[in-house]
Amino acid sequence: MECIDGTLACHTGVKARVTIKIDKQVINATFPGKVCVKKEDSGEPFVGSEFKCFRFWATGDGQITFQHYACGKTASYRTDPSLYGNGAWLIVDGEIQNSSNYFYWSGFVEGYQCARFLAEVDRRYEGGQISGSCDTCKGNGCFISVTTENGINYKSPRGAKCEFEIACGDECPQGYIRCETPGYPGYCCIPCSEIKGEIIAIKNTVKSLNNG
């Protein structure tokens, strides 16, 4: 069974449990036998639900002079009395954009009537000096495909972020530790990172007691 650019897992006759994560959605699916699991490009433009493309722009006497584009969750202008010309910083997710010299005026400045604007957009516009990009929040979507030896072909919903984990039979996925439990199915899978964090916390507690 070929599995080009994918993950080939589980033996014939052993169930394959695939956990698929599409953005914030989690899908648990079970397949018979050997599986080939791939993260694939949907080939279509997709804007993630978490991020937006923001356009900041400034005008002088009605003509566009500067434009800046940035990807994020929130955006705003932040006025600062120390800035010349009633200036304001360009803020995206709490961070000042570009250099400390990059701010937009508002009002009558140096013989020009200046104004600043901000909007959520889905493309770049022409005019003036342009900086920044929205390439990080736009791109092709993805999906997870699962193919089995007996001809099952599954495709997940499309999203901006796609991940998967595979467990074979009663095993746990890679990066998890199996622990026996009294209830069905008789075991659970705990992330190794979680156990590592608890061990570090215990060590720090013991260390603080010894130093106390």
Image: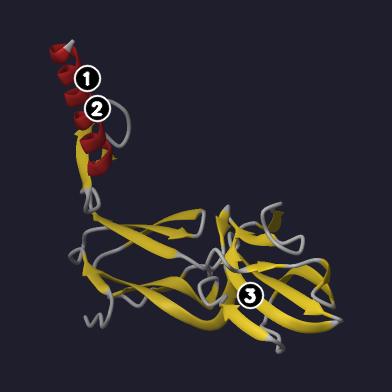
Residue drawn at (72%, 62%), measured in percent from left and top? 87
Give the residue type at disc 1.
Thr
How far across and down, in percent of the image, does residue 152 sit?
38, 74
Q: Is residue 108 visible from the viewing direction of this image?
A: yes
* Foreground of the two, 129 or 72: 129
Which residue occupies the extreme top position in the image? 212
* Foreground of the two, 107 or 181: 107
Q: Name the residue under label 2.
A: 201
Give the residue type at disc 2.
Ala
Q: Mark 3 points at which residue?
A: 68
Ranked by sequence position, the earlier of labels 3 and 1 is 3
Residue drawn at (22%, 19%), measured in percent from left and top? 205
In what element is the residue under mark 3? Answer: strand
How far across and down, in percent of the image, does residue 176 sit?
23, 45
Picture mark count: 3
Q: Using residue 90 as the reference point, say whether residue 63 is left or right of it.
A: right
Residue drawn at (71%, 85%), measured in percent from left and top? 125
Which residue occupies the extreme bottom position in the image? 126
Give the residue type at disc 3.
His
Q: Is residue 16 visible from the viewing direction of this image?
A: no
Q: Nearer the viewer, mark 2 or mark 3?
A: 3
- Asked if marks 1 and 2 touch (Cβ < 8 Å), the reply is yes
Q: Using residue 74 as the reference point, say whether residue 4 is left or right of it.
A: left
Alpha carbon separation for disc pair 1 and 2: 6 Å
Q: Mark 1 points at which residue?
A: 205
How many other residues sit within 10 Å of disc 3, few (<14), some (14-19) or many (≥20)?
Answer: many
**Residue 154 falls in image quadrant:** bottom left
